[in-house]
Amino acid sequence: MDYIIQFHEITKRFGHVVALDKVSLEVKKGEFLSLLGPSGCGKTTLLRTCAGLEQPTKGQVLLEGQDITHMPAYKRPVNMVFQRWALFPHKTVAENIAFGLTIKKTPRPDIIRQVRAMLELVKLEGYENRFPKQLSGGQSQRVALARALVMQPKVLLLDEPLGSLDLKLRQEMQIELINIHKRLGTTFIYVTHDQEEALTMSDRVVVMNHGHIVQIGPPAQIYQKPNSVFAAQFIGQTILFQGQVSAKNGESCQVATDELIITCPTGSDLHIGQDVFVSVRPERVRLNDTPLVDLENRLEGSIVNTIFKGPAVYYQIEAPGGRIITVQQHLEQDIPLYEAGSNVFVGWSSKNSQILLQ
Amino acid sequence: MVTSQTDRPSILSPWLRVGPLTIMMVIFFVAPIGIFFVYSFWTKEGWDIVRQWTFENYIYVLTSPVYTKLIFRSLGVGLRIAILSVIIVYPLAYTMVFKFEKYRDLILFLLAISLFSNYLVRIYAWRAILSSNGLVNWLLMSAGLADGPQPYLLYSQWGVILILLNVYLPFATLPIYSALLNLDRDVIAAAADLGASPLRVFAEVTLPLTMPGVIVSFVFIFLLTSGDFVTPVFVGGKEGMMIGNAVAEQFGALANWPLGSAMVFSTVILIGLLLGLIFLVYRIVRNVINRKRYDLYR
């Protein structure tokens, strides 16, 4: 496998705060990799060690196998798109995009040709003589992208570049970034705290928390097979139960929780009495007026809230014991919604209960 | 750029809010200046003011070799102090902002401490240091660098410049310091990320973006020092006399308000012209630097 970037046991301390704790990660050439996590998880710090804007306290950063840990930022063939874009306010759009090329002493006709190509790529033709303060957020974001891409970086680093755009624009830009990534084939490392964004765009997602990597995998795997309570709760929504393994037989096992006994697919390393969590995705749960006898896991409850979202409806259901769980129902056709107070039966198949150890 | 703004219903209308200052400025600044402006077109005969409009005073001031020399010397002294202070203060402010982040407040406090002491006390202290048997001369002579007391230290333009520089340094620091402090760190990081060496980052990004602070500091110090008349009295001697001293003389001992006023407004006009010239040169230089606009579709 061709790795373009390798982080080897990166530790970064700011005073007494440990931002990164022995983080190792390999980035494949040409992939779209997202670093996903809550704020303060170390994702931006990891990105900045790659750009050379932050020196790791310990560990190495390798670029195509070469140690670049101590190479200053301005010598690294990687470029960054900053969170608030960080455009040069005293330079025009064209000058912003041309900045890196003029530093490299690229001949002027080449600069003009490349700047023009970039303006076209990010759909900003006609804006070249505007100043950053005359641009909207989305336009500024495109300039920041063009300014980095014109350098033909080996890796493009993006630090929550869509964070300050409104939802609709953000979704448009996500698709545009995916298209640009496909077209150029550049390796993208993308930092975000928005799980939906990470799932939408990435080839692989790196879930981070408290300076550690929690899980690495393709979006579907991260979502369907979270390896921890943190991953299950941070990515998508989950109904979480806590209990002990009470029975185990070949294919399946039972977990006794306060509310009910849940049948789950078993893992080989489970033993009776072990404390575990069970995660169930809200959209994998069925809802009915009558008991769902064909499903292994069932409970009965009453609707507390009905939250209509268009393609789906969310029900908050009070289960026996007072616990509120949220269940999602897809609306494939116009069906009457349950009203608050109505009694419902909830059920899911054992294969949709996922055991989590931590 | 999206900025959040809280729209609170205003209790005071904007006019009321700027009112007190406006009234104060009109009564204590605009009116007296206006009165002297009128005076500058009158003349004095014996102890009486002749209320007849004439340019006589201006012609007298601007053709007198003594007064024009004093005016240009004052501008020269102010200009040198302003240039020196910007050169001294910029690296200090830069270091405070980017290197000694922890000690910023301490350094600011130390700068402010120098303002605690009385202005005159400091001038006397400098006199003690610069006088013929003062510290500097003693050191120079002990080190064998001078045969006798150096005359240029005290009672000279450089003496005045040295002391005014020292006095106004804290004021020069603040505009540049705050300009550097408000600089977006990511913009600097972006320049480095795009391949600019630290020197290029400074020349292409840091300096141009903090130029407004530099200009404020420069103008501030230039205006304040070129009109000073206290320091020249104590350490200026004959060579260090400035237009402020001549004005003080006209308003004081000679009681010739019309001529004094004309001196003031002649100086103001020349200062205006000089600053205008400086900015013109600055604009031209900047435009030459910026001439490489990427006019892509020409």
Image (cartoon, coloured by chain):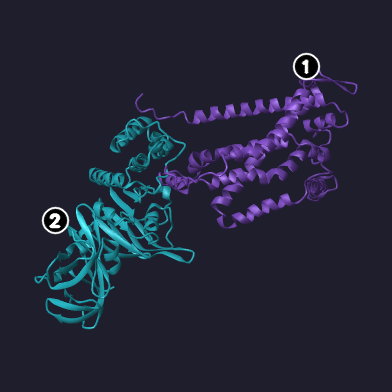
Chain colours: A cyan, B purple
Q: Check the picture and name the quadrant holding the N terminus of chain A.
A: bottom left
Where residue A334 is drawn, which disc sits there? none
Which chain contains the residue that carries disc 2?
A: A
Q: Is residue A269 something one can see in this rendering?
A: no
Residue denoted by label 1:
B53
Q: Please identify the quarter of the rendering in which residue A215 is found.
A: bottom left
Q: Position of residue A114 (x, y in %)?
A: 32, 35
Residue in the image at 81% along x and 41% along y: B150
- Determine the CA span between mark 1 and mark 2: 95 Å
Tell me where residue B258 appears, x and y as whole percent. Answer: 81, 24
- Res A48 → quadrant: bottom left
User: Looking at this view, is A240 or B112 the one in front?
Assistant: A240
Q: Secondary structure at mark 1?
A: loop
As rendered, which of A172 and A315 lies closer to the eye?
Answer: A315
B220 vs B195, left or right, is right
The residue that disc 2 covers is: A335
- Quadrant position of the C terminus of chain A in the picture: bottom left
Q: Chain of mark 1?
A: B
Q: Quadrant of residue A126?
A: top left
**Residue in front for this viewpoint, A6 or B272:** B272
Question: Residue at 66% of width from left, 39% of height from top?
Answer: B21
Q: Look at discs 1 and 2 and give the one toward the viewer.
A: 2
Q: Residues within 10 Å of mark 1 (few under 14, many from 20)?
A: few
Side of B157 where A74 appears, left or right: left
**Kind of residue indicated by mark 2:** Ile
Q: Position of residue A72 (x, y in %)?
A: 43, 51
Tell me if residue A193 comes above or below residue B199 in the rendering. below
